């Protein structure tokens, strides 16, 4: 399997939303994407751009407290996770974390460091780095679905 790496940057919140829209247009389903980076790095903002492009026009709630927000947009099923508050991976059993993998077209996971992602099939990793208002994003594909997505994005 090839492993494609790509680096892109967003100079503002608006650019981050645009980048999310670009990513949404490139997605090869089903796909699991991790969003890793500090608080305020722009993970939820990128998720908002993706969801907006897919056709969600309402508010995009940060799942920090709910852990997961579910969207069904024109028959595209999205699960947006935020693992920030998950202290024990066993908590994930409570809301049937693994079941989302069978029924979702797109899974976005903020704070993947909080859980053991090793038994989950991650297709694409996105790492966010903050330098002032600039956010540098490094994309690593981990599967064929990730490869196809990044090839479309390049
Ligand atoms: N280039 C940028 N991209 C995204 N957000 C930015 C950028 N510059 C400043 N910001 C600000 O950083 C914050 C990002 O918040 P959010 O997307 O919720 O981050 P996270 O989900 O990673 O904690 C917002 O308040 C936004 O206005
Ligand atoms: Mg967030």
Image: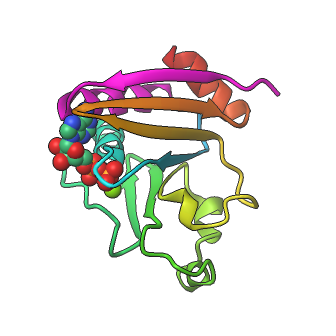
Q: Is residue 55 above or below residue 85?
A: above
Q: Nearer the viewer, residue 123 or 85?
A: 85
Residue 61: image quadrant is bottom left
Q: Is residue 62 above or below residue 5?
A: below
Residue 102: image quadrant is bottom right
- Asked whether 10 falls inside the magenta stretch, the response is yes
User: What is the residue that sits farthest to the top in this orientation?
Assistant: 154
The quadrant of the rendering that contains the N terminus is top right
At 63% from the left and 60% from the top, the residue drawn is 101
- Asked whether 51 falls inside the magenta stretch, the response is no
Q: Quadrant of ligand 2?
A: bottom left
Residue range corresponding to the magenta coloring: 1-27
The colour scheme is: rainbow
Any part of residue 56 in sight: no
Relative to residue 145, is residue 60 drawn left or right?
Answer: left
At 54% from the left and 30% from the top, the residue drawn is 139
Where's residue 10, x and y in %? 30, 26
Where's residue 151, x and y in %? 60, 17
Any part of residue 5 in sight: yes
Q: Is residue 80 above or below residue 1?
A: below
At 60% from the left and 39% from the top, the residue drawn is 124
Q: How many dots with numbers?
A: 0
Relative to residue 152, is residue 85 drawn left or right?
Answer: left
Where's residue 67, x and y in %? 41, 71
User: What is the residue that sits farthest to the right in this orientation?
Assistant: 1
Where's residue 47, x and y in %? 35, 45
At 47% from the left and 47% from the top, the residue drawn is 35
Q: Is residue 78 above or below residue 21?
A: below
Q: Nearer the viewer, residue 115 or 96?
A: 115
């Amino acid at each position: 399997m090839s492993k494609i790496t790509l680096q892109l940057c967003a100079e503002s919140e608006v650019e981050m939303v645009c980048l999310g829209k670009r990513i949404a247009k490139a997605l090869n389903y089903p796909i699991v994407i991790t969003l890793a980076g500090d608080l305020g790095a722009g993970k939820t903002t990128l998720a908002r751009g993706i969801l907006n492009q897919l056709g969600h026009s309402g508010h995009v709630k940060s799942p920090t407290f709910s852990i997961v927000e579910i969207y069904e947009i024109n028959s595209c099923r999205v699960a947006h996770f935020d693992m920030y508050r998950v202290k024990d991976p066993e908590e994930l059993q409570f809301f049937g974390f693994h079941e989302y993998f069978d029924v979702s077209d797109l899974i976005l996971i903020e704070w993947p460091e909080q859980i053991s992602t090793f038994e989950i099939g991650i297709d694409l990793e996105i790492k966010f780095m903050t330098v002032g208002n600039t956010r540098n994003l490094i994309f690593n594909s981990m599967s064929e679905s990730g490869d196809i997505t990044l090839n479309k994005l390049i």
